[in-house]
Image: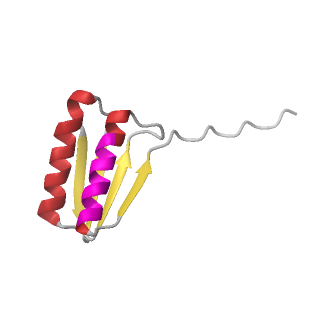
Amino acid sequence: MLFSHEFEDGVLHLSLHRDLDVTSRAAVAAHAEMLLSAHRPRLVRFQLPTADPSPASLSVLARLRHLCEALGTPMAVCARTAPSPSPRPAAA
């Protein structure tokens, strides 16, 4: 599965599970567009799989942003980040 979605309290949450490549970009974009059209959310939250997404992932983001603008729907974007390493104790 390339991405998942959840619709809750008028918010459509879309989350990519991994960075996309050229072959998967169109399928994800089409599915996400269908979800936006079907749910007509008041807000879209799009989660990228990394803080440095691939060009194909950014392409899907651009398509969704364009569609959200056309629908007048605000969009929030976030990225998963690696957990911060735990601080090392000071040397005695």
**The quadrant where residue 92 appears:** top right
In this rendering, would 61 be left or right of 67? right
The residue range painted magenta reads 59-70
**Location of residue 83 in the rendering, given as x and y in whole percent from the top left corner:** 54, 41
Q: Nearer the viewer, residue 91 or 38?
A: 38
1 shown above or below 10: above
Seen at 30% across and 33% down, the residue is 20
- On-image quarter of the N terminus: top left
Q: Nearer the viewer, residue 76 or 62?
A: 62
77 shown above or below 20: below
The prevailing secondary structure element of the residues shown in magenta is helix
In this rendering, would 91 be left or right of 8? right
Q: Farthest residue in the right direction?
A: 92
Magenta span contains residue 67:
yes
Total count of labels: 0
**Location of residue 43 in the rendering, given as x and y in whole percent from the top left corner:** 30, 67
Seen at 16% across and 45% down, the residue is 30
**Location of residue 57 in the rendering, given as x and y in whole percent from the top left corner:** 33, 39
Seen at 19% across and 38% down, the residue is 26
Q: Judge whether residue 1 can be spotted in this image.
A: no
**Location of residue 53 in the rendering, given as x and y in whole percent from the top left corner:** 41, 37
Q: Nearer the viewer, residue 84 or 19?
A: 19
**The quadrant where residue 77 appears:** bottom left
Colour treatment of the image: secondary structure
Seen at 36% across and 41% down, the residue is 58
Magenta span contains residue 24:
no
In this rendering, would 89 be left or right of 32? right
70 shown above or below 28: below
Q: Judge whether residue 86 can be spotted in this image.
A: yes
**The quadrant where residue 21 appears:** top left
